[in-house]
Amino acid sequence: MNASVDPDSPIGREARAWALAVTGEPFPPERSAALRRWLDDDPRHARAYGEAEAVLLALSEIQALARPPLQASRRPPLARPAIWIGGVTALAACLVAGIFVAQPPAALEAGGQARQVALADGSTAVLAPQSRLAPASRWNNRRYVLERGEAFFSVRKADGRRFQVVVGATEVEVLGTRFDARTSPSGQVRVAVEEGRVAVYQGKARRQIARLGAGDYVLVENGRAQAGRLPAPTEAAAWRAGRLAYADAPLGDVVADLVARGHGGLRVTPRAAALRVTASFQLDQADRFIASLPEILPVSVTTSGDRRTIDVRPGTSTSAR
């Protein structure tokens, strides 16, 4: 269902034509609207376009080596070839001729503080500290990749166009809603909905694993999905109000969140990091939470200078799930 599209098939040729047009000619609003309609018309269109664009982006690196010196004669650029000579060869010729320079889109990042960003389609995202969100495509302004951390999205409806967020092997798709997505260092993915409805897919075949409404969440880990209900829909992104909440999360993920929020002297050993914890606490009570860990888990917390280390108590048998 999600296999690569043959570049010499009708869809592949049309995708290539669109990708070359976007990077090689003026693109008025009516052409932009036409491309958007084509991309949304069939999932294979978006996939084929992404593959064609990926080739262009990869080949753009060649241009730095193939571009003639500035003092060379300024001859008119060669016309774009009408055929796909072995796929890559024709595109390389376009690059050498200087027809386009395809720059990858810039990622959005948050430092030590949460950051609210306006997305290109009019939606907004609030990035948790140390999070990174990247546009998935140079052209599709409704598809993003959450590369690190957590983000809360307020999605604007746009004529039925789907808004998609890729989180690891999981993909979230909506038309217009408010939801939170998180990817942790252990690979656990969490999607929670504050308002509207969200579909969650898994893997290259885009197998639907959950359909969430307001107040629903799903945890995805090792290919398995576990759905649940929040105490209230507003709990979807409790971190925005200074509270961290976890359901059966690896302790290492909790520690990573605390480090990202200013607890730089905190570390956890690999054995302790694999322990699971369900907890909820205000960020300004994090020190109390850390001190209470030996009461709820078989761990010890030792302090040396400004460093605190969480480790499994001697004699404890642990196993990661």
Image: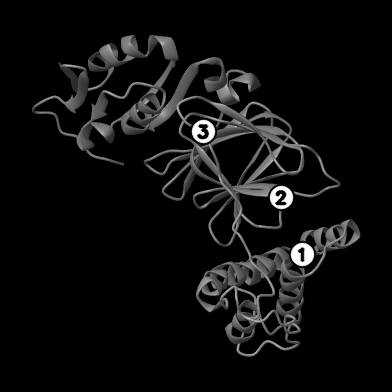
Measured along the vertical axis of the image, is residue 208 above or below residue 70? Answer: above
In the rendered image, which quarter is residue 260 located in?
A: top left
Viewer-proximal residue among 249 and 80? 80
Query: Pointer 3: residues within 10 angstroms few (<14), some, or many (20+)?
Result: some
Viewer-proximal residue among 201 and 7? 7
Q: Report the mark closest to the observer, 1 or 2.
A: 2
Q: Which residue is mark 3?
A: 110
Q: Secondary structure at mark 2?
A: loop
- Amino acid marked by disc 2: Asn
Residue 233 place in picture, x, y as percent = 65, 22
- Amino acid marked by disc 1: Asp
Q: Secondary structure at mark 1?
A: loop
Q: Residue at x 70, y 68 (%)?
A: 44
Numbered label attached to residue 144 = none
Q: Marks 1 and 3: in contact by CB < 8 Å?
A: no
**Which quadrant, please, contains the C terminus?**
top left
Q: Which residue is mark 2?
A: 141
Number of marks in the rendered image? 3
Measured along the vertical axis of the image, is residue 13 above or below residue 41? Answer: below
Residue most extreme to the right: 30
Q: Is residue 205 left or right of residue 194?
A: left
The answer to whether residue 1 is visible is no
Q: Report the mark closest to the observer, 3 or 1.
A: 3
Q: Residue at x 81, y 58 (%)?
A: 36
Query: Pointer 2: residues within 10 angstroms few (<14), some, or many (20+)?
Result: some
Measured along the vertical axis of the image, is residue 26 above or below residue 272? Answer: below
Query: Which of the marked residues, 1 or 2, is nearer the chain's N terminus?
Result: 1
The answer to whether residue 45 is visible is yes
Residue 170 place in picture, x, y as percent = 54, 49
Q: Which residue is mark 1?
A: 42
Measured along the vertical axis of the image, is residue 185 above or below residue 80? Answer: above
